[in-house]
Image: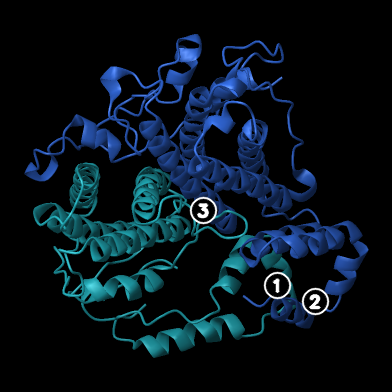
Amino acid sequence: MNLQNIISEIEKVDPEVYDRLDTRRKAMKKFANLSGKVALASLPIAFGSMLNTAYGKTSSVTDLVTDTLNFALTLEYLEAAFYNKIAGSAGYLTASAADQTALTKIKNDENAHVAFLKGALGAAAVASPTFDLTGGKGSGTGPFAGYLASYAVQLAMAQTFEDTGVRAYKGQAPNLQSSRPYLTAALEIHSVEARHASHIRQMRRALDAAIPAGQKPLKPWITLNYSGIDYPPAQANINLSFAGEEVTTQATVNIIGIGGNSFITDKAASESFDEPLTKAQVLTIVDPFIV
Amino acid sequence: MQTTKTSDDQIALNEERIIQPFSRRRFLGYVGATSALLATAASCKKDPIVNNTGVDLGSGDVGILNYAYALEQLEAAFYTQVVLTPYSGISALETEYMTDIRNHEVAHREFFKAAITAAAPSSIIPGLEVNFSSIDFTSRTSVLATAKAFEDLGVTAYNGAGQLISTTGNGPTYLTLAGKIVSVEARHAALIADLIAPGTFAATVDANALDSARTPAQVLAIAGTYIKTQINASNLPS
């Protein structure tokens, strides 16, 4: 897409386009800032919000889309805050060099997601909540207190956040259908969260800590409603992130043994499909971490 | 869209529609639907040839389901072969993972077959004939490189197809179903990348840490190497 050509085309049918943009200096400034740091992939969104601002109220960015993107942004704030916080902590420093590199990569990705969504939302972006990563709603003494000293707990938290993120984005996709660029961008984040989850799960399997004996081996995909996490202080809350993943019927089609393939067991059937979470379910899960 | 049109004609037609100057009033009307404008603008670049002969994927949501069914057929056939004739030196862990992925891909394939048969029995595409002559199934390097290509292709295909699904009727349900599958493909993609080079689970993302998306034409141009059956994607939504 050639942005300059598009603006030129607009100018042909609306000679005042530059005036419109200029008189909305905020819009222009926002766009100029964005284009400096955001790669081409996000330009349709940035350009879209610029136009919406310039042309006033006939916005294609509906309240539903804005709310949904802000919900996504809030989850990204949480993930970014978590990875930023554990970096260099005592527990983290016990990890192998390869694991630390992977966590740095994921940290950078989550911070990039924050920047991307903030850029897309512009002035409509919500501010970051204050987080209590101990899960204590501000007390600092929640069930994950001590996570900074324990690498196993950090990875358990990371897996929970990533798997929850995948399910959260999935649940919101229909709410973004009115805006094709935003829907596509959200899907492009969704699959990255799944990549993260896959790798964190491999790291946890290799570390072999805090995995319930009956749920081994831990896979890169979600088996039944197994969390793959043994952490009694917060077990009930962790389990919420995996509840519902055990379904083996999709759109009324029973997946177990489908097509006469007996190797598709209940475990395989559940692994083959990740399940969405509603916004309310996700908010219940993250609530303890938000002050 | 007439299936008799040549692809060049079709591309020319699309470009004409985009380039044709529109009235100011029409433009101002458009801005209310910025996303539609941008989607059009984003599609300006020429897509690879879309074949207008061969197995017709069809139109609308069923066309998208057939498109996904075609890709899952390809993946399932590939992993079925990998499990049947493991590459030399395959580890126990790799065998476990290849078997799991085979199970998932067969489940996806059979799911689409059942779902399309239920929704539109006269529109389902037949089983496709694959062409794996370029793959050396005895070689870990060849198998994993192909697996990575297929998984990354699947992720970009589903990411690109989401916006082509209708917003009404069963559309949102189909979108969610596609979402349920694409994240599993992404889990596979990350694992395979890690098997090839540890730590490369998300090496393909862009500067915003986003995965990418491909149009059906782009996807089928790549997948075509491995599918012998000619596929006509020209009636898919765009």
The amino acid at mark 2 is Asp
Rendering colour (chain B): cyan
Numbered disc 3: what chain? A
- Label 2 resides on the chain identified as A
Q: Are discs 2 and 1 less than 8 Å apart at CB?
A: yes
Instruction: Judge by depth and name the residue closer to the eye, B144 or B170.
Output: B144
Residue B6 visible to an observer of this rendering: yes
Rendered position, B26 above or below B108: below
Choose the circle earlier in sequence order: 3 or 2.
Answer: 2
Q: Amino acid at mark 3?
A: Glu
For mark 2, give the secondary structure. Answer: loop
Residue at the spot 55% in from the left edge and 82% down from the top edge: B17
Chain letter, colour blue in render: A
**Which residue is label 2 attached to?**
A14
Residues B168 and A254: in front is: A254
Colour convention of the picture: by chain
**Image side of residue A101 versus residue B134, left or right:** right
Instruction: Say which residue appears at 27% left-offset and 33% top-offset.
Output: A270
Q: Which residue bears the numbered disc 3?
A: A188
Q: CA distance from mark 3 to mark 2?
A: 33 Å
What residue is pinned by disc 1? B27
